[in-house]
Amino acid sequence: MKLTFKDLRKKLYIFATEKTIGFTLISIFLGLVVGAIFLAAAGFNPFQAYWVMLRGIFAKPSYMSYTIIRATPLILTGLSIAFAFKTGLFNIGAEGQFIIGSVAATATGYFLHLPLLIHIPVVVISAVLAAGIWGGIAGYFKAKFGVHEVISTIMLNWIALYFQNFLIYTKGFQKPGGETSYSIQPTANMMILKTWKQSEAGREWLLQHPFWKDLLRTPMNWGFVIAILMAILVWFILNKTALGYRLRAVGFNKFAAEYGGINVNKNMIISMFIAGALAGLAGALQVVGVSHKVTLIAAMEGYGFDGIAVALIANSNALGCILAGLLFGALKYGGTKIQMFPVKAPSEVINIVIGSIVFFISIPKLIKVILSRKNKKGSTK
Amino acid sequence: MGYENVTKSLTKVIEMKNITKKFGDFVANDSVNLDVFKGKVHALLGENGAGKSTLMNILYGLYSPTSGEILINGKKVDITNPNIAIEHGIGMVHQHFMLIKPFTVAQNIILGQEPTSKMSVLNMKKALKDVKEISERYGLYVDPNAKIEDISVGMQQRVEILKALYRGAEILILDEPTAVLTPQEIVELIQIIKNLTKEGKSIILISHKLKEITDAADFCLIIRRGKHIDTVVVSETDEEGLASKMVGREVSFSVAKDDKEAGDEIFSIKDLVVKDNRDIIAVDKLNLSLKKGEILGLAGIDGNGQTELLEAITGLRKVESGEIKINGENITNKTPFQVISKKISHIPEDRQKRGLVLDFDISENAILENYYKNPFAKRGVLQYNNIKIYAKELIDKFDVRPREESKMARTLSGGNQQKVIIAREVSNDPDLLIAAQPTRGLDVGAIEFVHKALIEQRDNDKAVFLISFELDEIMNVSDRIAVIYEGKIVGIMDAKDAEVEKLGLMMAGGGNE
Ligand SMILES: Nc1ncnc2c1ncn2[C@@H]1O[C@H](COP(=O)(O)OP(=O)(O)OP(=O)(O)O)[C@@H](O)[C@H]1O
Ligand SMILES: [Mg+2]
């Protein structure tokens, strides 16, 4: 069988328009092309820049570890937004829920003194609950007063931000002399092999095993595994449970859901609670795994907003959020590398790439039109 | 005379030749041919899911055909999108309207082709003038400044037609235009169609109502399961002839029904007061009761409180005062969930808004009220195997086409969407079945089936409350008939004593109270 150019174009068209994955891949590719054009226009060699970036992600075990660490919170905030979206809500509040989660984790991690195996779960669960309630507030406002969740979550974001900054200047929480909180107790620290890494024997062993030494240089922790488990859990809840059925029904058509006896208001609150909990988990894991404290923040850090992009790239698919989060983490981490020698390009280029990918994904019609014009001319002959 | 002879002297404006359309493996249109002539009405007839809307969507550029070609005024045209169709003078009024609710009539009509003065500023004055001119020319009277959300469905349809004419349509596709209209509005629409053809416009009319086809159409294309069956000259056949060609067997138009003694009262409404969306009283101290084993038909003109009454019963709308009882239990102002659990089922009048989650597949839609119950869910986890088996049963029993439980509700034909809802609600085996416009958009075969299902429900000693704008349906199926006017019941009679004239008079408010 001979594959003609026309067949190929037709295949490509079907791939891009009927398969979501194909469409996403094409959007990513186009985003990279746009980034390359910008790089070239600014006088950099795009191939070199991308090569440096690629090496910056994969060349060393520690690079890959950093990429994963970067990706972990984005997977979770992405999940938070994707989950809300599947149930018909637009959660702009992942940012604030993330902050509440990290503040709650820092507070319980520092003030409570608990045995090793209990402390981490207590910290994480209280952070998740706090952030869940934070998200639930927006759901409640929508259900009770009809306040659109976009408005309320944006306001809640700012309240969360100033709340964190307020706490950082509160005696007993603020580490004297710094614009940060105290660090959490060692029992609440989730870094892998943290004490062993610094012990005599550990250092000895690592000296002889450069691979592991390089890998463990990073604050590697269990967060990524938890994020993957969460993605699976979210997928399961949405697609396989009665709760998920209810939530999706409300999301797709709340009039039909109401008619079918589903309590629309209650389910909106539940949905926002779960979305908040997921974003809060991202904040908690960041604290117990990486930062161990919270610091003064001047502006939003963007975990929640990047989560929107992750959810978009993943087409709100829970498992897709893992891949989209990794892509995002890789672009963000690898992107820092092109600022350095030998490329020395502004890291903003990476934001252009990310922006373009999101752009192409949000306007599927454009790609379809471009491809279909050619394809249809071919097929009617 | 035969089709060939009659059409010899006419001008062909559209030729669709050997059109085939596949969705995956499914063949929705199989080598269909359609010719449309200037100044003539061409009807499309076929069962639910036969492929009528699909064929028209192809002509309007919404789908591209898998094979086949289209000629407009003798020239081959690739209609890859609706703009091309509009350029060639094709306009379409869809089965489900596509208007922007908060906009005014005039704004909707000119949308996309706004007249502008210099500097491309919107020239609303000219727009209003143009709209007025067209509407007077064809007798399509509307208030150009009214908002879409405030006008009746019949008016919305006029807006859709005006919109197409405003864009210069010479060929107008009307996809089941009468399904949502009241009998009076249908008479008016047919007059409008006549006005249009007089001015040389061509019309393609899809309808399940054979009477409309014989009244309004010149020719009729009959499609069965995607296949081209025949094109006939309407004046040379009759309703029975059309029906049997369409279904492939004889169809009975009358409903077979045995006499039955009704049982005890099961459902009652006392002094019910309900307000509409604008906070005006829509149901005004209404009283009504139903007995076991009877079908009570509610006749009335659209907008006399029927919608509000049903929403109040089913918990979707607040009751101001009064009492609703089933099996002796008060269900006034209970939630929909509580109402459903008292064994009340409801076929809603708006299938796309209330009846279906369009982005769920058939099987998910089949369990809308029961998704959390055994055997569909166990300990909160959905049992997809059981759900599928159940959905398959419904599909078989109610002849939903195609027979694929994993098909998205959105991709079903209008009539098959309706069948899914009916299947679900009847299978809940309710004590009281509320059926609002249950046969809207169904083909004659399916209507026969639904009527049988309602009667079977009654024969099993259940109560059925039938709300319909079709007097024929009310009179054929009901045991008793109540007439609603301005939110009140203005008369109740035995179906045997009902006459069209009498009912019509009462519906218009001239009742004998
Ligand atoms: N986008 C789609 N994807 C898959 N199948 C489709 C799609 N659109 C239509 N179909 C299928 O094609 C068949 C024909 O549908 P169509 O809407 O043309 O029927 P119809 O003759 O208009 O029926 P009705 O009288 O019920 O409106 C149906 O079986 C329908 O399920
Ligand atoms: Mg149709």
Image (tube, rainbow, N blue to C red):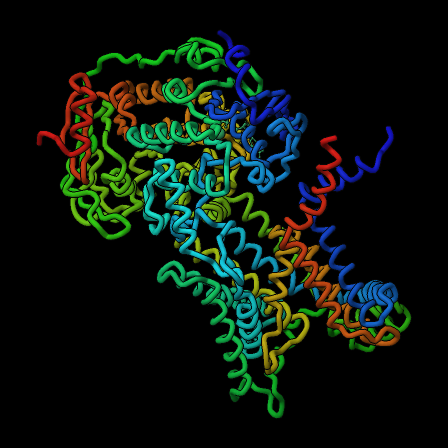
Residue A14 in percent (x, y) is at 71, 39
Q: Give above or below for B379 relative to B504.
A: below
Horizontally, residue A206 falls left or right of residue B467, namely right
Residue A62 appears in view: no
Q: Quick one: A194 or B509, which is closer to the camera?
A: B509
Residue B59 in percent (x, y) is at 57, 31
Residue B176 in percent (x, y) is at 43, 29
Quarter of the image for residue A66 reads: bottom right
Residue at position x 71%, y 37% in the image: A376
Residue at position x 57%, y 66% in the image: A124
Q: In which quarter of the image is the C terminus of chain B?
A: top left
Which residue occupies the extreme bottom position in the image? A177
Which residue occupies the extreme right position in the image? A208
Residue B340 in percent (x, y) is at 33, 38
Q: Quick one: B38 or A58, which is closer to the camera?
A: B38
Q: Give above or below for A270 relative to A302.
A: above
Q: Quick one: B7 or B496, which is closer to the camera?
A: B7
Which residue occupies the extreme left position in the image? B513
Q: Give above or below for B380 relative to A363.
A: above
Query: For the image shown, how many numbered marks are present on the structure?
Result: 0
Horizontally, residue B448 falls left or right of residue A234, namely left
Quarter of the image for residue B448 reads: top left
Quarter of the image for residue A138 reads: bottom left
Q: Quick one: A64 or A216, which is closer to the camera?
A: A64
Residue B71 appears in view: yes
Horizontally, residue B19 falls left or right of residue B339, namely right
Residue at position x 18%, y 33% in the image: B508
